[in-house]
Amino acid sequence: MTETTVDTWPEPPLAGTEAEAVLGALDRQRATLAWKCSGLDSPGLRATVGASTITLGGLLKHLAHVEDSHFARLWLNTAVGAPWNSVDWESTPDWAYRSAADDTPEQLLALWRESVDRSRAIVAEALDAGGLDQLGAYTTRSGERPNLRRILLDLIEEYARHAGHADLIRESVDGLTGEDPPR
């Protein structure tokens, strides 16, 4: 896996626009996950902590699904594509976490990066057409639609929630701790 270093570490602007700040915060969370998963072999990505079954590989695959599903479902109101569309989510809701053990580190990182790239392209196109207040195509039962801001903030929350898991798991693998990338 590619190492994330201080030279490539994304930092949200101190005085940017709202969109720049939100996207900067999301990119920093993405970089944190990438860093916590970097340089590990298959056993490292399959390691667990305590009674939890969550692995770093599982987090990569889960967050790849979150990236794809949030924009497909909430922004575009379309079905999510492969490999997610072939999963029986009703009978295997934890498929992304469990099936990650069958994937190589390279496959997991590629799946996650491709999902992130698709998300970035969708967001760039959306921002070219307007700002964060634009409404997604999905409509709730009560007739509400999420705006782009809400979708991006939900992604930040999802990454931040899992960053704590990644911290604990990575420390158990090789002692790597901290919030800052290697210098």
Image: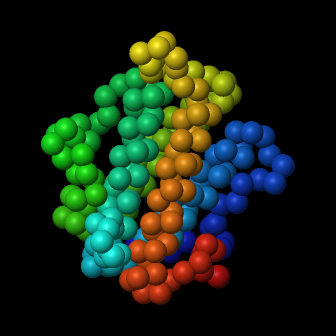
Q: Quadrant of residue 118?
A: top left
| Quadrant of image for the N terminus | bottom left
> Residue 106, can we see it?
no
Which residue reaches farthest top? 143
- Residue under the point 45% across and 17% down: 139
Position of residue 125 relative to residue 22, above or below, is above
Instruction: Work out whether residue 141 or residue 173 is closer to the camera in this orientation and state it.
Output: 141
Where residue 70 appears, x then y in whole percent?
A: 44, 37
Figure disc tally: 0
User: Which residue is at the far bottom?
Assistant: 175
Seen as rendered, the residue at the extreme right is 15
Report x, y in % for residue 166: 45, 68
Q: Residue furthest front?
A: 51
- Residue 183, quarter of picture: bottom right
Q: Residue at x 15, y 42 (%)?
A: 91
Where residue 169 sits in the image (x, y, percent)? 41, 74
Q: Is residue 24 left or right of residue 65?
A: right
- Compared to residue 139, the image places residue 2 above or below, namely below
User: Residue 32: x, y in percent?
Assistant: 55, 65
Specify the quadrant of the image occupied by residue 7.
bottom right
Q: Is residue 94 visible?
A: yes
Colour scheme of the rendered structure: rainbow
